[in-house]
């Protein structure tokens, strides 16, 4: 959409239409009243920190039907989310705050797993992952003589993608 807008011809004689384009709104704010300018300049830093670019505003103002995950590259405003809980208290009513959950993706994943009865934890350290992998390999019957690479490939290419949770799930998938 932004690329289409950039390619659109702009009538250089219609200043108002040019300023109304999303691409222009990234750089300009139109103030028509002195009181608006005074209010803008007197606004606390918290209001400036949550200023939304037009592309961000589209995400915020859209009427979603459920939870939404928004990702972005460097410089897209994700850092603001780190302390957004504090800002929500200043910017939102208590009723609005009840509808908003600010949580990092790791905690969200753990909550989801626990909601469905999984007693899980996220493994960040290679040593933790290796300990679980070694425990699984040591549980293998002695009469199976396959290299570790076979088991790793089966785990990555069969068990994980197909969601196998039991031996029966695995044998039905192959």
Image (cartoon, helix red, strand yellow):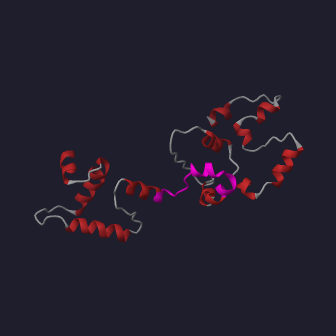
**Could you tell me which residue is drawn at 42 percent across and 58 percent down?**
110
Q: Is residue 108 left or right of residue 22?
A: left
Above or below, 128 against 18 in this view is below
Q: Quadrant of the N terminus?
A: top right
Expressed as whole percent of the image width and height from the top left, the position of residue 2 reads 64, 37
Q: Is residue 152 magenta?
A: no
**Could you tell me which residue is drawn at 19 percent across and 54 percent down?**
167
> Can residue 160 be seen at all in this image of the molecule?
yes
User: Which residue is at the front of the view, 121 or 114?
Assistant: 114
**Could you tell me which residue is drawn at 77 percent across and 57 percent down?**
44
**Could you tell me which residue is drawn at 60 percent across and 56 percent down?**
81
Question: Furthest residue to the right?
Answer: 34
Q: Is residue 66 left or right of residue 11?
A: left
> Can residue 76 be seen at all in this image of the molecule?
no
Specify the segment rendered in magenta: 87-107
User: Which residue is at the front of the view, 5 or 36?
Assistant: 36
């Amino acid at each position: 959409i932004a690329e289409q807008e950039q390619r659109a011809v702009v009538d250089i004689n219609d200043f108002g239409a040019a300023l109304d384009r999303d691409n222009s709104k990234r750089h300009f704010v139109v103030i028509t009243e002195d009181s608006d300018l005074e209010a803008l300049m007197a606004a606390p830093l918290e209001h400036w920190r949550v200023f939304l670019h037009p592309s961000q505003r589209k995400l915020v103002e859209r009427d979603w039907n459920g939870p939404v995950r928004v990702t972005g590259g460097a410089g897209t405003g994700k850092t603001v989310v780190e302390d957004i809980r504090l800002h929500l208290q200043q910017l939102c009513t208590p009723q609005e705050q009840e509808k908003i959950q600010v949580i990092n993706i790791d905690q969200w994943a753990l909550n989801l797993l626990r909601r469905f009865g999984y007693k899980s934890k996220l493994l960040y350290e290679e040593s933790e992952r290796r300990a679980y992998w070694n425990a699984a390999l040591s549980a293998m019957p002695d009469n199976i003589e396959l290299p570790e690479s076979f088991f790793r490939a089966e785990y990555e290419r069969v068990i994980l993608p197909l969601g196998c949770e039991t031996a029966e799930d695995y044998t039905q998938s192959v």
